Amino acid sequence: MKLFTYFRSQASYRVRIALNLKGLAREDVYLHLEKGDQFAAEYRAVNPQMVVPTLIDGEHRLFQSLAILEYLDEVYPEPPLLPREPAARAWVRGFALINIADSHPLIVPRIRHYFDDVLKAGEEQKLAWIRHWIGAGLEAMEALLAAHAGSGRFSHGDQPTLADIGLVTQVTPARTFDGDLAPYPRVMRVYDHVMTIPAFAEAAPAKQPDAE
Amino acid sequence: MKLFTYFRSQASYRVRIALNLKGLAREDVYLHLEKGDQFAAEYRAVNPQMVVPTLIDGEHRLFQSLAILEYLDEVYPEPPLLPREPAARAWVRGFALINIADSHPLIVPRIRHYFDDVLKAGEEQKLAWIRHWIGAGLEAMEALLAAHAGSGRFSHGDQPTLADIGLVTQVTPARTFDGDLAPYPRVMRVYDHVMTIPAFAEAAPAKQPDAE
């Protein structure tokens, strides 16, 4: 498999974790999002949205991190990234979507560039925006974990799921942008545990060959 | 089933379409998001993220629209919202996620309120922001449809899928906010076709009892 990736991309990070958990080897192709590599014509032909990640698996070209995670779980089912029971699967997906579909889209590079180049809002307002939305997601995650009988060392159950992947890619940018994590002890308990698992630790941005 | 919904909510719209397609009856509970009904303590206990939709199916309380759609497809499989083959499922999910995880999160009421109350960016800058990000998603959808052999009357294949649901909830706010749809003829061809299907048409915001 070939992964078009950027070390800092949380969406790429999600796919790296999943590939590691499933023991799937990959060849990385590095795009530097801050330098605009994603806008090159060659990459636009690979991914018309001009975002990472893209995963190539044989003849299949896969895009959007959650669609890739679901694909990997269907084609390479062991170990599973989702529990078996539909309501539990919905909880896990819903939890992950707080990161994937609510918080993270608000802080990606294209949004930060829009703040700089179009809104010209200034560094302080941009940072306040980022911290506000990361915090809103963390607050929802903390409340969900508090109310969920299935949470403990993991967000749900006894093994890593999509929920933990979304939790990690919520906490990581909180740290990058100096967000306050003290109000989220349940989130941090899960984070600290899953980051002891090599599949998670080795997928971290700082461990990637293109890290700066 | 009980659906906590708001007529204008595109995430609620997605779930209404899916329930209609599957012929599942529901009882609606209306929350007026502009009036802040979602922040009431009773609703916070139902959905700690204080967003709609929430779907109650028997003992299960389901949140996040995509997680709900996947749940419905697992528990009530006919007619399916996803094709059978994993790479096709990934395409359909990836297409829908352009709306669900990239464009739509940037224009929801909480974001517009942040623009008004915190950024104080002014109406013109807020509208430009909304149109810019809806347009970026539409552009990606148009390019994906152009490159996808499986697209035609539907985004993929011969029956409605998650991709069409995401397409409809991309076009609807584009219309609400006077976005230019002329550059997206493939998107609009699918939109115009699926809106002839009662399950889609009857789920539209203007058809809901709480519509203003």
Image: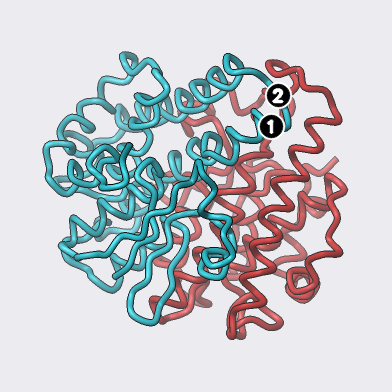
Chain colours: A red, B cyan
Dot 1 falls on which chain? B
Please identify the quarter of the rendering in which residue A152 is found: bottom right
Q: Nearer the viewer, residue B28 or B48?
A: B28
> Callout 2, which amino acid?
Lys
Judge whether residue B155 can be spotted in this image.
Answer: yes
The residue that appears at 66% across and 55% down in the rendered structure is A137
The residue that appears at 38% across and 62% down in the rendered structure is B68
Dot 2 falls on which chain? B
> Callout 1, which amino acid?
Asp
Q: Is residue A206 above or below residue A93?
A: above
Q: Is residue A116 above or below residue A187?
A: above
Mark 2: few, some, or many residues within 10 Å (few <14, many ≥20)?
Answer: few
Quadrant, the N terminus of chain B: bottom left
Mark 1: few, some, or many residues within 10 Å (few <14, many ≥20)?
Answer: few
Please give the label number shown on residue B89.
Answer: none
Please give the label number shown on residue B120.
Answer: 2
Please identify the quarter of the rendering in which residue A118 is found: top right
**Residue B138, horizontal then vertical, whole percent:** 40, 27
Q: Which residue is mark 1?
A: B117
Judge whether residue A24 can be spotted in this image.
Answer: no
The residue that appears at 29% across and 35% down in the rendered structure is B148
Q: Is residue A126 left or right of residue B104?
A: right
Mark 1 → mark 2, Cα distance in angstroms = 6 Å
**Residue B147, horizontal then vertical, whole percent:** 32, 30
Mark 1 and mark 2 in contact? Answer it, CB < 8 Å. yes
Q: Nearer the viewer, residue B122 or A154?
A: B122
**Residue A178, horizontal then vertical, whole percent:** 87, 48
- Disc count in the image? 2
The residue that appears at 56% across and 36% down in the rendered structure is B106
Quadrant, the C terminus of chain B: top left
